Amino acid sequence: MPGFYTRGVDTSTDIDLPALALRIKALAGEFGFQRCGIADVELGEDEQHLRDWLAQGLYGSMAWMAQHGDKRSRPAELVPGTLRVISVGMDYGRDPDEAWATLDDHERAYVARYALGRDYHKLMRNRLQKLADRIADEIGPFGHRVFVDSAPVLERALARNAGLGWIGKHTCLIDKDGGSWFFLGELYVDLPLPIDPPATAHCGTCARCIDICPTQAIVAPYRLDARRCIAYLTIEHEGSIDEALRPLIGNRIFGCDDCQLVCPWNKFAKTTDEPDFRARNALDTASLADLFAWTEAEFMQRTEGSPIRRSGYARWLRNLAIALGNAPTTPETIAALQSRSEIDDGMVREHVEWALKQHRA
């Protein structure tokens, strides 16, 4: 009958798919997701965009971006049987004035807003699985798999197709009613649910994100050169950072938010008080010198359950050394750098030496 799907695993059960789609969105809201939409699995244009980006080598050292072939843009190949993708978004917005104040104070450390609290991956993954379990409680077992940045998934393209927002010129997803400060997660399902209309783009002639980028990593609208991106350099990149880029990094020690901070659509962003996203270890106010003094044991203890753990201790010190090299020349800054001038790690030592040279100059 129209609007119904008789599942092969239980031919006695008819599912009202439009009603189920509405129910899923209501349940998503109950589990703390501010956005939820449903997309099909066709990503042909995005697949070509990804191939071009990879062919130009703009992914830097993230070789894993090319290791899965086209599975990233073909959900049904990644998880056979997938017919639809339920895309969800969870807000993590904070007061933007706090961010600007930290960026303007070069003795303080700037950490990307998403990384100030606990790692969002586990929180969202658990809630998505609970959503899947609730759906199964109501309709019976169904094929599904949860993803939160945990597999080759074109999450922004899927979210756009699900109506959650459009991909801006900075390559982040933007919701005209809620800005860009939100995380994404996906539930691949084998249910032929009705799909939502994709979001339309509303960047217009605005180029604030391109103009503000400290390292000019947005080389063209919708085209990011990861090799110049501060988020990539401070989180993903191993080894030495190009000396020409170091002064441009400023006091950003883990990620960068400038392109989102200037986006005019973020005047509609919602702030959140989700306990897991509250700043830990005073990372929203900490000084560079204080963080640079952390021992490796302290780093491991303080970053437990934090996305910052991803960078590792050596890269943490490398990033802080660069920021201290860009900081005002004060006795505290010099003392902090000199305390690591003979560190065993050659990469960190090289960045400390560079930083001290900036102050001698």
Image (tube, grey):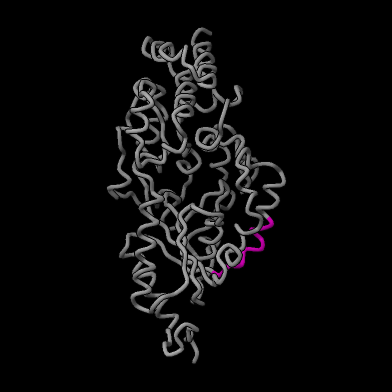
Q: Nearer the viewer, residue 32 or 139?
A: 139
List x then y, in percent, for residue 137. 33, 75
The residue lying at 61 percent from left, 25 percent from top is 242
Give the residue displayed 38% in from the left and 26% down from the top: 296
Q: Is residue 75 left or right of residue 52?
A: left
Residue 18: x %, y % from top left:
44, 80
323, above or below 284, in the image: above
Q: Quadrant of residue 129?
A: bottom left
Q: Pick the residue in front: 272 or 69.
A: 69
Residue under the point 34% across and 69% down: 27
User: x and y percent of residue 85 in the render?
Assistant: 50, 67
Q: In this picture, is 84 found above or below 292? A: below
Assess whether residue 350 is covered by the magenta stretch: no
Q: Between residue 284 and residue 354, name the one nearer to us.
A: 354
Q: Residue at x 37, y 73 (%)?
A: 135
Residue 218 position, x and y percent, is 60, 41
Task: Answer with left or right where residue 297 lies relative to residue 266.
Answer: left
Q: How many circles with numbers are drawn on the protein?
A: 0
**Which residues lie in the magenta part?**
40-48
Q: Residue furthest bottom?
A: 1
